[in-house]
Image: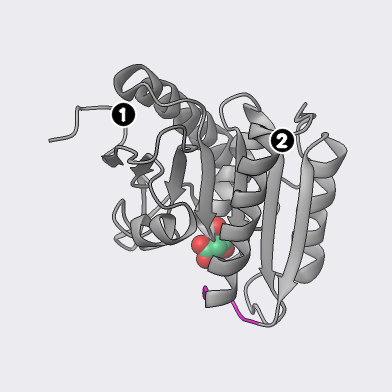
Amino acid sequence: MEPRLSFVHRFKPGTRPGARPLLLLHGTGGNEDDLVPLGEMIAPGSPMLSPRGKVLENGMPRFFRRLAEGVFDEEDVHRRALELARFVEEAHKNYGVAAPLALGYSNGANIAAAVLLLRPNVLSGAVLLRAMAPFARPPEAKLAGTPVLILSGARDPIIPAANAARLAATLKDAGAVVDHRTLPVGHELSHLDVKIARGWLESLATVQSE
Ligand code: MLT
């Protein structure tokens, strides 16, 4: 059984020495089990820490409150991002995992972006799948060299292209090394996401071990 930390979560120890830990952040209506198979496809053998969002919207777990689709309660985003950052620190103490790279989908990608901007040292990078800018006026962050992959969908009915581009620009301005690509898909995940994210993570591991 998992220890009682501040989020219901699942922890899967790594099986590959030195593999970068992942923080898995599910989309609306998901849970702590959802992204584990995706994590395994993208980063086989990595330790995985997977919390369940605490906010319920009609019974569906999320990581922060929204007022409407694509309209966020930014005070809640702020508070919940700090809460999630504290959970990552608790997990560090309990499981001994180093700063993880976030792998977030949709609402999970949006809270990951908020954590990057509010607590830059908590994550070692991020793969943001179908992400939006979490703040209308983002805080100033120092993300020097933090690698971030953003994969957007050209036919995504939920996320305007300009919004994802604004997020990429904000992270770049903060010093992150951002790779933003738009795929010929909608809001749903595709095999292309898996292939690109896996290749991107592998190239990161290579660069870091050189
Ligand atoms: C959000 O609320 O974070 C975004 O609109 C994506 C979603 O969860 O549908």
Left or right of 166: which side holds 157? left
Single out the mark in the foreground, 1 or 2. 2
Is residue 28 covered in magenta?
Answer: no
Question: What's the magenta bit mostly, secondary-structure-wise?
Answer: loop
Q: Quadrant of the C terminus?
A: top right
Question: Which residue of the protein is positioned furthest toward the top in this rendering?
Answer: 93
* Residue 66 shows in the view: no
**Mark 2 belongs to which amino acid?**
Thr
Q: Which residue is mark 1?
A: 6
Relative to 190, residue 100 above or below: above
- Kindly give the residue lying farthest to the front in the view shown: 210
Q: Describe residue 77's horizontal placement relative to residue 152 as left or right.
A: left
- For disc 2, the marked residue is 146
Residue sitting at 78 percent across and 48 percent down?
Answer: 178
Seen in the image, is 136 located left or right of residue 108? right
* Closer to the camera in the image, 47 or 157: 47
Return the x and y of residue 28 as percentages of the image width and height.
43, 61
Residue shown at 64% from the left, 36% from the top: 116
Q: The N terminus appears in which quarter of the rendering? A: top left
Q: Secondary structure at mark 2?
A: loop
Q: Is residue 189 left or right of residue 207?
A: left
Do we see residue 136 in this rendering?
yes
Disc 2 crowd, CA 10 A, few/some/many (<14, 14-19, 20+) = many
Crowding near the residue tagged with mark 1, few <14, some 14–19, many ≥20 C-alpha atoms within 10 Å:
some
Point out the stretch of residues depicted in magenta. 185-189
Q: Nearer the viewer, residue 123 or 84?
A: 123
- Asked which quadrant contains residue 16, the reply is top left
